Amino acid sequence: MTNYLIEEWSETHPSWGEFAACLEMVAPEQAPFVFGDYCRAYPAYLLVALRLNEVVGFLRFAVQPIGPEANCPVLCLDGVPLTEAKIHAFAVREDARRQGLGTALQKQAIIRAKELGCYQLASYSSYGRDANYHIKLSLGFAAQPESHGENKQGVYFVMPLQNKIS
């Protein structure tokens, strides 16, 4: 197992450009979810995996109300609006895969989302991302396959973070 460190960065971090370069190299299709208007409406958090002070992976999520993204009213429990940590970008460089970095990033997102008072952690992934599916399912996420438009299939993953059993 290679030694690594996970840090939370903001856009003002002096090495933000290194994260941006990693994103463009590893998962350029996810760039609009980081740099576009898509996730600017809600507070966003970036977890960066570093190996020898080099960015080798990342996970970015936003804290948003549950419901409006699906064109539904905000979901409430006992009159309190519920929020979710929605993962918008997640990737690990190919040379750093299968070393536990992806799992560590997901676990840190779970911890951080709980700290932020989120009711759940959610993520969408298109079909064919078996390594991502393995991580999420092994951590206990529920999975709901979905179809969007013509042949755009994927899986919506959700992990409850607060249990309200009376």
Image (cartoon, rainbow, N blue to C red):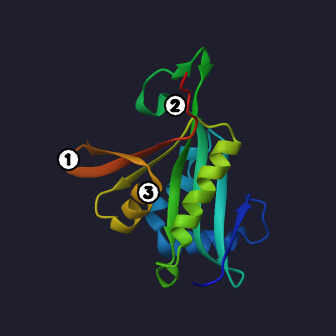
Residue assigned mark 3: 136
Distance from disc 1 to disc 2, alpha carbons, whole Å, reads 26 Å
Closer to us: 44 or 12: 44
Distance from disc 3 to disc 1, alpha carbons, whole Å, reads 26 Å
> Which amino acid is tagged 1?
Glu
Residue 31 visible here: no
Mark carried by residue 140: none
Going from N to C along the chain, the mark reached first, 1 or 2, is 2
Going from N to C along the chain, the mark reached first, 2 or 3, is 2
Q: In this view, does 13 lie above or below 44?
A: below
Residue at 56% of width from left, 27% of height from top?
164
> Which amino acid is tagged 3?
Lys
Mark carried by residue 66: 2
Q: Look at discs 2 and 3 and give the one toward the viewer.
A: 3
* Image spot of residue 158 (x, y percent): 44, 43
* Image spot of residue 111 (x, y percent): 65, 51
Residue assigned mark 1: 150
